[in-house]
Every structure is written in structure tokens, then in C-alpha cells.
């Protein structure tokens, strides 16, 4: 796994945006896998800036989001559809019909999950998947003990995740208990994966994901099995890595680093 340690959140976000721009330069009709949460907000701000000021073009791009809360309609301010609309989609030129976010209100979740997987395949697969990481080591809503071969399905959120996400709702009681999420197996099929993490509270999960054993107890550790996965993390999130010196040495020796 390639580990890129940045000074701070801002540098992490700009580095990640350069990776997205590189992918789009090579393939203007790339399929992007996108994440919600606090972590990618800086990346999305930078992409919006690059779109406005540098002409970064999304007109041929297709996007698939990782997950959505079950029970929240698209119009709910805490739904991930709404989040993506407000924080990215309405500010760039990605065509509306190319945007896929799992439905939190379908009447048939099993059929929807199958259809979602099928749409990803029909669109040619995901070229670049953006990920955050939970304090419990999850990617998307693949909570500890999720199968590393899992596909898009409904998951029950861990208590820790509900507590972590309560800051966006009035109280933990208002956080939905279920989510529809791409599986670890779905994520691992992306051609390139970019995990972002910022802040000291993510340091234990980051260390376990990068340097711990591959285990369903830290679903982000499955990225160790991927051929082209990179972690772009700030110094605080990197603070518990045993091999930090080595990653910084590798970075210093890589003239074309993003
Ligand atoms: P955060 O969430 O970016 O809001 O910290 C990350 C996650 O739970 O995957």
C-alpha cells in the first residue's frame, strides 16, 4: 500500500484532488466511487475550485456513492444524496443521470442492491474509489466482522458509528440504525483506491488498517490485498504508524509523487 503523509488536512485534500485530476486527465469518462463524511469535504472543495478555475471537466464522469442511510429520503439534510448534492454535485458539471447514490427508501432492498452492483459493472467498473475510515476501522458502512468478500447490502451500524455520526443529527437516537452499503468485495474491485484520513482520533484505525493483520475486524485492512491502493493521511492520523519514517523516506525518494 502506498502511504502518503501530508502536513495537515488541507494538504491531504489537495493531494487527493490531484490524484482525481490525474485519473480524469487520463480518462475523461472515468467512473468515480465517492464517499461522504467530514473527511472528503476538503477534497470536494478543491475539486470544485479546480472545476471553476482550471476547467476540470466532469461532463463525461459517472459517480457511484458508497452508502446511504436506510429510511432517509433524498431530501433529508442528513441523507448522503443531499450531502453529495450540496457539497459537490451542484457545483460541478457531472450529468445528473450519471450520478448513483444507493436509495435509502426503496421498497425492495435486495433487488436494489443487486441492481446497484449491476450498474457498476455495466458502467465499466469503478476507476477510482475514494474512501474515509471510521474510528472502528470501517470502510463505507462495513462494520467490524463484515465479510471481506461482501457485496452491496444492508448493514446494521455499530454503536460506535452511531455515536460518531450523532454530531450531524440532534442526538444518537436520531441516527438511522441501518444503512445500505457497498461491500468490501465491491470496493476491492475498484481499479484504484484512495483512502483519506485526518486527525488523531483516526490514528489507531489507520495504524491497524495499514500495518495490522488483514482482518474483518478492521475492514479497511482489506486494502492491503489491493494492487493499487493508496492512503493519503495527515500527520496526526499517521501518528501511530510504526513505519512512518519509512513511508516518509519513500515519499522523499519519489520525484513524481502527487
Ligand atoms: P468521517 O467518517 O469522514 O466523518 O470521519 C469516516 C467514516 O466513517 O468512514
Image: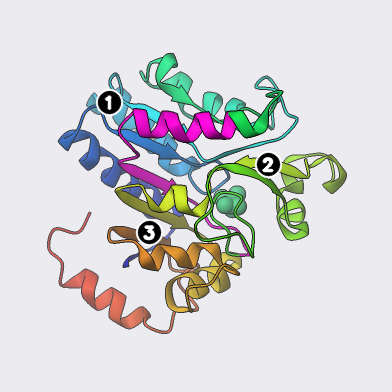
Which residues fall within the magenta stretch? 112-136
Q: Nearer the viewer, residue 237 or 70?
A: 70
Task: Give the image quarter of residue 134.
Answer: bottom right
Tell me the quarter of the picture where residue 28 sits.
top left
Q: Residue at x 58, y 27 (%)?
A: 81
Ranked by sequence position, the earlier of labels 2 and 1 is 1
Report how far apart the C-alphas of labels 2 and 1 lie in the structure.
Answer: 36 Å
Q: Which residue is mark 3?
A: 232
Left/right placement of residue 173 relative to residue 88 reads: right
Alpha carbon of mark 2 to alpha carbon of mark 3: how far?
26 Å
Q: Looking at the image, do the residues carrying marks 1 and 3 touch, with CB atoms under 8 Å apart?
A: no
Residue shown at the point (75%, 30%) measured from the top left: 71
Relative to 44, does residue 200 appear above or below in the rendering? Answer: below
Mark sitting earlier along the chain (2/3): 2
Where in the figure is residue 103, as x and y percent of width and height? Answer: 62, 27
* Quadrant (top left, top right, bottom left, bottom right) of the N terminus: bottom left
Tag 1, which secondary structure? helix
Residue that mark 1 sits on: 53
The residue where tag 2 is placed is 179
Of the two numbered discs 2 and 1 in the rendering, the one whose residue sits closer to the viewer: 2
Residue 141 spot, x, y in % from top left? 61, 50
Q: Earlier in the sequence, mark 1 or mark 3?
A: 1
Depth check: give the residue in front, 75 or 226. 226
The picture places residue 254, in percent across and down from the top left corner, at 15, 67
Q: Which of 56/149 is in front?
A: 149
Determine which of the numbered discs, if any, sits on residue 133 in the image. none
Query: Residue placed at 68% from the left, 24% from the top?
Result: 106
The local secondary structure at tag 2 comes to: strand
| Mark 2 or 3, closer to the camera | 2
117 inside magenta stretch: yes
The residue at the far right in this view is 173
Mark 2 near mark 1, Cβ–Cβ under 8 Å? no
Amino acid at each position: 500500500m502506498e502511504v502518503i503523509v501530508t502536513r495537515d488536512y488541507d494538504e491531504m485534500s489537495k493531494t487527493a484532488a490531484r490524484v482525481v485530476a490525474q485519473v480524469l486527465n487520463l480518462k475523461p469518462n472515468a467512473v468515480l466511487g465517492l464517499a461522504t463524511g467530514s473527511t472528503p469535504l476538503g477534497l470536494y472543495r478543491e475539486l470544485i475550485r479546480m472545476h471553476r478555475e482550471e476547467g476540470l471537466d466532469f461532463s463525461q464522469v459517472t459517480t457511484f456513492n458508497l452508502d446511504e442511510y436506510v429510511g432517509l429520503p433524498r431530501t433529508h439534510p442528513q441523507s448522503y444524496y443531499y450531502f453529495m448534492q450540496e457539497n459537490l454535485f451542484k457545483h460541478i458539471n457531472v450529468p445528473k443521470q450519471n450520478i448513483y447514490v444507493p436509495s435509502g427508501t426503496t421498497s425492495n432492498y435486495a433487488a436494489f442492491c443487486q441492481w446497484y452492483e449491476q450498474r457498476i459493472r455495466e458502467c465499466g467498473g469503478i476507476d477510482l474509489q475514494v474512501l474515509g475510515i471510521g474510528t472502528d476501522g470501517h470502510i463505507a458502512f462495513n462494520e467490524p466482522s463484515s465479510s471481506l468478500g461482501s457485496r452491496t447490502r444492508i448493514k446494521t451500524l455499530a454503536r460506535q458509528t452511531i455515536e460518531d455520526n450523532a454530531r450531524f443529527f440532534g442526538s444518537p437516537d436520531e441516527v438511522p440504525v441501518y444503512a445500505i452499503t457497498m461491500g468490501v468485495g465491491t470496493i476491492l474491485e475498484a481499479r484504484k483506491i484512495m483512502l483519506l484520513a485526518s486527525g488523531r482520533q483516526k490514528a489507531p484505525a489507520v495504524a491497524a488498517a495499514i500495518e495490522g493483520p488483514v482482518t474483518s475486524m478492521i475492514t479497511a485492512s482489506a486494502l492491503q490485498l489491493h494492487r493499487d491502493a493508496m492512503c493519503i493521511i495527515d500527520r496526526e492520523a499517521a501518528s501511530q504508524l510504526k513505519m512512518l519514517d519509512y513511508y516518509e523516506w519513500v515519499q522523499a525518494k519519489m520525484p513524481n509523487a502527487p
